[in-house]
Amino acid sequence: MKKLFIFAGFLTLSLFISCTKSIEQQGVSIDTRWRFTTGDDPAWAMPAFDDSAWDSIDPKEIWESQGRSDYDGYAWYRIRVFFSSSWIENAIIKDSLQLILGKIDDCDQIFVNGELIGENGKNLKGRDESNAEFYKEQGKWNLERRYILGVHDPRIHWDKENIIAVRCFDQGGAGGMFGKNFEISMTGLKDYVKFDVISDPFTLKGENMITKNFSILNQSGTMDFKGKLLVKVIRCDNGISVYSEESAIDLTRNLSIDKSVVFKKEFTIPAVLKISFIESNSGNMITEDVEIPYILTPPTPPEPRINGAKVFGVRPWSPFLFKVAATGRPPLKYSASGLPDGLKIDPKNGLITGALKKKGEHLVMVTVENDLGFNERELKIIVGDVISLTPPMGWNSWNCWGLSVSDKKVRQSADAMKSSGLIDHGWSYVNIDDGWEDTHDKDGNILPNDKFPDMKELCNYIHSLGLKIGIYSSPGPKTCGGYEGSYMFEANDAQNYASWGIDYLKYDWCSYGNIAPKPTPEQMKYPYKEMKHAIRKANRDIHYSLCQYGMGDVWTWGAEVDGNSWRTTGDITDTWESLSEIGFNQYKCSPYSAPGRWNDPDMLVVGWVGWGPALHYTRLTPNEQYTHITLWSLLAAPLLIGCDLEQLDVFTMNLLTNDEVLTVNQDPLGKQAIQVRKTDEFEIWARKLEDGSVAVGLFNKTTKPLYIPVEMKELELDGKYSMRDLWSQTDLGKVRGHFEMKTPPHGARLVTLKGL
Ligand code: GLA
């Protein structure tokens, strides 16, 4: 089997901690042997209680998935554990014992031998500190439960059996214990000394210089640690260390020390930053490996090149606004031959405007020139009933600004979309999410709040840049953020939007749940049909984006209510768990995607995000971000950037401006990729493209580099194909039968296969 090159010798990029003593010597795993019952009784905390009649349960999974599908309220878990004093002897740090109990949805009290030791993730010295209303506390469901006890705590019985009882309360939805980590062990260096490698992203500057700030923190309130800090940069292609630095470090209790490293490394070569602390007395070491961003997208050439959508849909009489996206050394001159009557192109900025009266199709040849030459490409204009013939590409305020969005932030984002050059790669929508609304006035007009002084003026401004503007509302009386919704004002709102010049509406179910608490399929569709009619009457092309988190398999009926896209999932966040869970589950909706009818797995979580006003750099690793953009492109998903566009860094720009990758997303055939193969370790997805070629995505779900094998038969391909790597925009030669590609941890490869 011919091995295709790429990233030989990738290192394990996941965080790993190495300690000389294993958990067996210093504690015990408690991820099995639990007993469980629903209900509530204080006697269940007591060691004398006989729980043998209770059910057994897996603490790693919520109780709903273990035969208690609709249960909300109190429930108890119990386990018996022998605490061996040899754990103390074996431990380096001999003063504390920790109980790690995964996560608990929603609230918990923990008892050891009948004594209360903690509540909702907080250690308690005794029952007096207990909060009788502990069960009302919200938002703790995703918190890792780690309770610490001093080794001399009288509530612990050394060299005897101890009874651990967990009293849970679930307020609705998923309930009980879940997660990965369940153990009782002596605390070690790794529990006190932590690296913060996330708060500050890498910065990439000229001459391949990379800077990284991080901090090292001693969380212990009683112990100081002395040792060595070792920082290395190791290339993933050959395992060679290209930078190394060693320094003595004193970690006084409760102290955090900031560090900065500056090193030289080719931006195009994957590498890891390995940070280690070696404690002098014990020789114990903790290490964290951090992926360094690497750039795959080649620089944009100075010669003119037309990018973006090749097909554009418009309804008769609707205002026409299409920006020819093109890159190349300025000034660029735009022209078009074959433009139908009613349309004109601005030679300076490539904006095609006007209106078309009749249904029909027009093939227009667009040309872009500069002093280095010219590039021409066909644009198909379809005047008909369906708009958004390629997935919308743009920005939305939610994942960065949340409810703190304002007129100023929207203008700044639009300016940045233009000045960064994103607009030249086809990015066009600037969408305001929740947080702009005030109330309806006496005539039923929706009024923006103080943060948006003049919506019409804002729309004019966005349009003047060659961009489009979107807005947000809910079919319920209130939006998810508690602002005014469109309930009973659908026609007025649609009229207002059209009169301002809105091009996109995200319509979010939210409080409609109070109007239809257990909606039938018809009730689910009803509010979306109402707004559909209102929009159609308003006589303006407004992309209609349904947002109801996939309820009732919306992909099977979204087109019926005229949705141009529909959210297929709950809200995304910037973690691998969220990204992979959402992304790889889109196979269900694949058959329902078509031009103008897109499945929407939610917005992009790259760059500076934060759901407002405070932002942080995405917690996704560089490889996870490559997976994100690769998968969303294959899924023909709307691409809505969710970050602060004023803080776009080189790596994020590299992700968002690879025209060969974006071409897959914008392919006019509009066929979403299908999941060709799924194993525990990897997935293969393939998307048929308009020119007869196939785009293939290889995804590594593990934390180690992996060779992913692909059989051409499983892609329904037979014969010889030329293969191109889209991220690096290079030809990889010819393939027949099968191929395999080395794929980085949580990373992706994206190729096209074209018949020869
Ligand atoms: C819901 C949506 C988000 C966002 C918020 C706004 O959670 O799913 O995308 O629009 O509402 O409140």
Image (spheres, grey):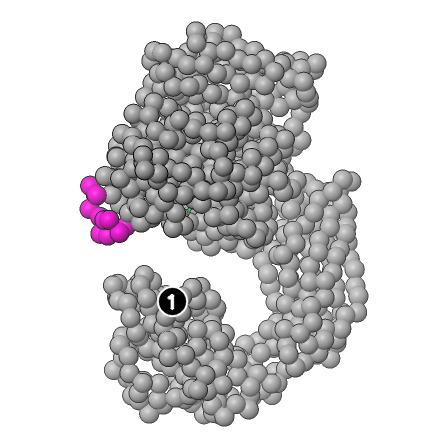
- Residue 464 seen: yes
**Does the magenta portion include 656?**
no
Q: Position of residue 415 (x, y in %)?
A: 59, 32
- Find the magenta span and give its range: 513-523
The residue positioned 44% from the left and 73% from the top of the image is: 120
Mark 1 surroundings within 10 Å by alpha-carbon count, few (fewer than 14), some (14 through 19), many (20 or more): many
Q: Secondary structure at mark 1?
A: strand
The residue positioned 57% from the left and 76% from the top of the image is: 22
The residue positioned 75% from the left and 55% from the top of the image is: 261
Q: Position of residue 306 (x, y in %)?
A: 57, 20
Residue labelled with disc 1: 105
Q: Is 230 drawn above or below residue 381 in the view shown?
A: below
Q: Position of residue 577 (x, y in %)?
A: 47, 54
Q: Is 290 drawn above or below residue 82 in the view shown?
A: above
Total marks shown come to 1
Q: Nearer the viewer, residue 6 or 637?
A: 637
Q: Quarter of the image for the N terminus: give it.
A: top right
Q: Is 663 drawn above or below residue 44 in the view shown?
A: above
